[in-house]
Image (cartoon, rainbow, N blue to C red):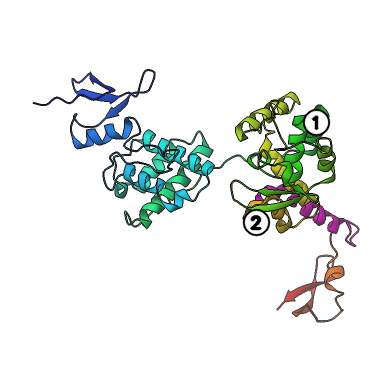
Amino acid sequence: MTRIKLKGIDRFRDRHGKLRHYFRAGRGKKRVPLPGAPGSPEFMAAYESLVGGRSLERIEPKSGIARLDRAAPGTFDRLVFEYFNSPDFLRLVATTQRAYRSVIERMVLEERIGHRLVSEMTREHVKRMISKRSASPGAANDLLKKLRLLLNFAIDSGWRNDNPATRIKKFAEGEFHTWTDAEISAFEARWSVGTTARLAFALLLYTGQRRSDVVRMAWDDVQDGMIQVVQQKTKAKLWVPIHPQLAAILETCSGREGTILQTSFGKAFTSNGFGNMMASRIGDAGLQERCVTHGLRKAAARRLAEAGCSANEIASITGHATLQEVARYTKAAEQRRLARTAIDRLSNSDDAHGFPNPNSRFGKVDENNSNINGVSEVWRPVRDSNPRYQRERLVS
């Protein structure tokens, strides 16, 4: 009889005397239970999905092509492999590919579904997967988004006819805090013009761009009073006019070359390195943890909205692809503007008590039957308790 020797397998007998097998990737790693007996199809499929690359190797940096060691047809391992090599995935920018790959691979590993058939996934399976992550609403929603995308790819590939992840409600998420003017002033008071922190702050606030785009801005991009931006996430090409306060700060850095923002070693910032640097400077300014770099992008949109800019005008600066996203960024500013307008109209009405006078808005009503704005009105006397005569309007 041939013995099977597999690396990373632990065996235990439970309190009922049943032999159970577990896989452990290494010291300190969590044990993962394996189904069936060693050598059985379900055991080997689960083992292959967990050991070194889970039947699926990462994309090779040089070629950009993934290699398939072994993944059974119809399984999630095979689906993931085919998706990572599809035009849908390969047309994404590198940073987005890494983000998608991280979420999808972690989902397959944590849920142990690599060897499972895609056609067997149900709506209840999806709900359980999302519910387990309820403590982290953002992560749960992100997983749901990627799972929908993956199952839509399965439909396009003819693996199934429906998507069980559709119409499942997302968790309510907190939004990035929009910096207030007081918080902006506090940062500027702590970091004076001439510091890297103030330069970075001004670029974020006065261009309304993401940190991944701000770190790539170069002096060659500054032309005719504008900064040229090609957004890394959306590939949108923008020309952003330079605000006078940003122009004054840039003027103190004249004569430099390369990227506008540079480390103390004269190198360009990475996006993560820049984020860490700004988090430290924000903390040094005594601001709360809610103040993050992305909140300055929202503050830029807020200020544009408060200045009376339309959604299209704001999108021309921020580069948002949809006006719905712009509305989400500026809803607070829009609510304040509408509320002010409403109260101004109320306070300017002719009524001494501060309530609108219907006659002043709709015209004077004559003593007899009238027709105002195309609405026929009939008046009749009604005796009240005083006794007096009042008028009751019956709209026909």
In this rendering, does residue 174 appear at all?
yes
Looking at the picture, which amino acid does disc 2 mark? Leu
**Is 334 within the magenta?**
yes
Residue closer to the observer: 358 or 287: 287
Q: Give x and y (percent) for residue 149.
A: 44, 50
Helix, strand or loop at label 1? It is helix
Quadrant hosting residue 387: bottom right
**Residue in the image at 51% along x and 35% along y:** 136
**Residue in the image at 74% along x and 40% along y:** 203
Looking at the picture, which amino acid does disc 1 mark? Ala
The stretch in magenta equals 327-353
Q: Give x and y (percent) for residue 330.
A: 71, 49
- Which of the marked residues, 1 or 2, is nearer the chain's N terminus? 1
Crowding around mark 1 (Cα neighbors within 10 Å: few <14, some 14 to 19, many 20+) is: some
Q: Are marks 1 and 2 in contact (CB under 8 Å)?
A: no
The answer to whether 80 appears left or right of 240 in the picture is left
Quadrant hosting residue 55: top left
Question: How many numbered badges does the structure rendering display?
Answer: 2
Q: Disc 1 versus disc 2: distance between alpha carbons?
A: 31 Å
Q: Quadrant of the N terminus?
A: top left
Q: Give x and y (percent) for residue 206.
A: 77, 44
**Residue in the image at 66% along x and 33% along y:** 268
The answer to whether 140 appears left or right of 203 in the picture is left
**Is 283 within the magenta?**
no
Q: Which residue is mark 1?
A: 186
Helix, strand or loop at label 2? It is helix
Secondary structure that dominates the magenta span? helix
Q: Which residue is mark 2?
A: 323
Quadrant hosting residue 199: top right
**Residue in the image at 59% along x and 50% along y:** 234
